[in-house]
Amino acid sequence: MAGAKLTPSPSEIDPDVKTEVQKTPEPTWVNPSNPLRTMGSFGSDAGQRYQEEYSMDSTNAQVQVEFYVNENTFKERLKLFFIKNQRSSLRIRLFNFSLKILTCALYILRVSLDNPKDYNPCTTCRNNSEANATSPTDIDWYLIFWVNRREPVWAIQVTVALISFLETMLITYLSYKNDFHRAIQRTHSAMFNQVFILICTLLCLVFTGACGIQHLERAGKHLNLFDSFYFCIVTFSTVGYGDVTPQIWPSQLLVVILICVALVVLPLQFEELAYLWMESQKLGGNYSRHRAQTEKHVVLCVSSLKIDLLMDFLNEFYAHPRLQDYYVVILCPTEIDIQVRRILQIPLWSQRVIYLQGSALKDQDLMRAKMDDAEACFILSSRNEVDRTAADHQTILRAWAAKDFAPNCPLYVQILKPENKFHVKFADHVVCEEEFKYAMLALNCVCPATSTLVTLLVHTSRGQEGQLSPEQWQRTYGRCSGNEVYHIRLCDSKFFGEYDGKSFTYASFHAHKKYGVCLIGVKREDNKSILLNPGPRHIMAATDTCYYINITKEENSAFIFKQEEKHNKGMAVSGLYDAPSRLPVHSIIASMGTVAIDLQNPDPPEESGKLTIPTENGAGSRRPSIAPVLEIADSSAILPCDLLSDQSEDETNQSDEEGSVGSDFVKGYPPNSPYIGSSPTLCHLLPQKAPFCCLRLDKGCTHSSFEDAKAYGFKNKLIIVSAETAGNGLYNFIVPLRAYYRPRKELNPIVLLLDYPPDNHFLEAICCFPMVYFMAGTIDNLDNLLQCGIIYADNLVVVDKESTMSAEEDYMADAKTIVNVQTMFRLFPSLSIITELTHPSNMRFMQFRAKDCYSLALSKLEKIERDKGSNLAFMFRLPFAAGRVFSISMLDTLLYQSFVKDYMIAIARLLLGLDTTPGSGYLCAMKITEEDLWIRTYGRLFQKLCSSSAEIPIGIYRTESHMFSTSEASPPSFDA
């Protein structure tokens, strides 16, 4: 066969043309796909036979093989027409059903035309009957065995009976040793079939009983057909009025037989129906095709559904007004949880949420969920699994199955580990948990409470939390928590439309000054990349898409223009948009001010000079003035944008001792990435890779004899990261802290305190970064903490361990982490400890004080907000408000919100430094000191930063000291 030549057959071009093989000088393969069977038929279950004809010649031998010749027989053709072919078999079933209906109608017609009193039998028979009929209950057997029909009715009845009998015999013959019922019922569900069988059984019993009693009572009381039907209904319903009863023993015997049959058949049918109903309740039934075509729905695929996950999804999904009419179909392989069942029985959710038990890997279950008609499919990973890689593998298969079944359905996928992200690159939106987690924890060390900022931005809130609190910071904090990111085209915007042709910095400052909104980014029409604070170089165009932070989007705002007059107040004029409520323009900006979006400049100026008091108008009691923000920036004032330049202000005007800190660093892209799909980021790197032995902090080597952090003599405070293993996601903790825009002299040494030593693959990825070390140890060992330099550290980041994420009691997964952090909080009270927890509700145990009145008041406030239905009831807890605690489940809403705002993931990645775009800014922090209080207001701070360094402030992180009694603590206040 290896030397045979495959020749195209004419049947490959036209499959309806039968191939005739002729003798040729060379051996030729004959196309085996000759259409010897009817198209659309199924193969026989009894087996397949073929016939071979050989034609031998002295010089050549040719073979013609005909397949499926068994289907050419007369029986097979009949079977194909009556059983296998769906269209023809449906017609046969409809014809058979029509015969049954016609038979019943003819019988009813015959009964209505029948009158036993009009019979005229022979005289001898009549006399015998009258002689024997001594009482009304005596039986006239002649009326039972003889029915006087009219000839047309008799002819039609006989014809219909013969046709029905012959058809039944033919079907019985054709279905012998074949699954006839499977062929008939394959298009219906088991529940439908069982209900249909039960209804048919009841109808047959009632109709047979009514006809039989009526016929037998012809020889007795002469009951009509309606009375017999009434008697059967009353009897089978176990009511038994007794007003209509059979009078002769043959009809009474028939009633006994019918009751016995019903007692045997009906309980079996009801039992089967109840079983199927209970199973369908577990599986959730089907999402109707009619509803899928007339209503909009999304599908949520999860491995296991917990109550917290469900409520986070529903609250965030239905927080948007345009999603109120959507249905949510949950596809989960496990049986519905009791708590989830109770939630779904609430009227608010029972009409919107449909739970289906099934697997996303089965096309039948995807068809039940009507995946091909869905507006979107959310595929979430089970983060509480011990083996997170296996959880990712399941998510990948679900994503592949959904894409294969419904290629046009948008996919929103959640992946746990970054190395698995490239498998779902085809999805419309992907959120990698470990990427966001480590980048957020890293920025918490240099930009306080970044995790709180991002969490509040990706949660939908109306900013009504804490408005009844007696404390000012809680009211401000709660109101500003309603800020979210929105977008609008410049030409359609009232906020930004007047700044066409102006610089981005000018538009951002004046939009904030006039409307109280914060313009943070822009996107060109011809460019898919979003730019955060592109600076004064960017000139706004009418086709630009503007991204801004505000309490609500512009379309839902009402504009009130105030005309200031000398002696009277301004008159309010109705604005451009009609809104259900008029929102105040003042204080709309998110109050997170020292967190700013800086320009993409490799050599940022010294922060100490950004808020210096101007020399002019700075003396006396007059308030110092601030330079105006120019419409078009002066070219001489625009900062250079040479990313690979090695000149920076932090290397000039400093002593030789300070200059030695970063004199050996270079800027470049990391040569080794630990996983496929990581975004290249320009970083501070070592000129040459450090040997692996030099990365070990607690052991000396031939290149260095240092064995603890003290021996190294670091100039800056340490950042210690406690993790279980050196996963690939930990790489995203290092990159933001070594990004090119971080001043070299402010780079903090990073120490990785790992339970298990890292492998060479991870060391190869981090050996190019300066001042990055690791050591084996745990946070519950004091010697390990002292050796890694805990007393020289500013920040300790405690990452949730994978081995403790699952526990017998769900919320106990954080028990060990909480107790260890509480111990370190007591031993090192000045240390900033940033902790990741599995469950957000456990953050109330962080820095726990049992008798602290202030903490108890916050706990009471949290309960009040939860009772009001707030999605962010935990936001007033001091550890969360201060950015000291974080749970990755808080970022689940980022994926849900991207269904409405498809740009949210891109903006979050830019803010966290996971992606870098040429011309885009970055997130930084600036500390306000007493010397900077001449600024006085947030608006003047906005103007000062925009005019001096073209930075856009987006929030304030505020700490206040209060005097309390001995039973109270001094809480940090956080306005965001």
Image (cartoon, helix red, strand yellow):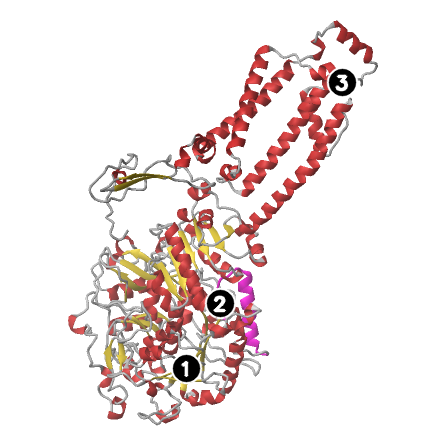
Sooner in the amino-acid sequence: mark 3 or mark 1: 3
Type of the residue with mark 3: Gly
Q: Is residue 562 something that shows in the picture? A: no
- For the residues labelled 3 and 1, the Cα–Cα distance comes to 99 Å
- Cα separation between marks 2 and 3: 77 Å
Q: Write the start and end of the magenta stretch as one range.
A: 851-876
Q: Which residue is mark 3?
A: 220
Residue identified by numbered label 1: 757
Q: Residue furthest front?
A: 58
Q: Do the residues under discs 2 and 1 have CB atoms within 8 angstroms? A: no
Tag 3 or tag 2, which sits nearer the N-term? 3
Q: In the image, is 703 to the left or to the right of 334?
A: left
Q: Nearer the viewer, mark 3 or mark 1?
A: 3
Q: Quadrant location of residue 680? A: bottom left
Q: Residue 805's x, y, as percent?
A: 50, 71
Residue type at mark 2: give it. Answer: Glu
- Residue that mark 2 sits on: 385
Q: Residue at x 42, y 63 (%)?
A: 393
Q: Which residue is at the front of the view, 309 or 727?
A: 727
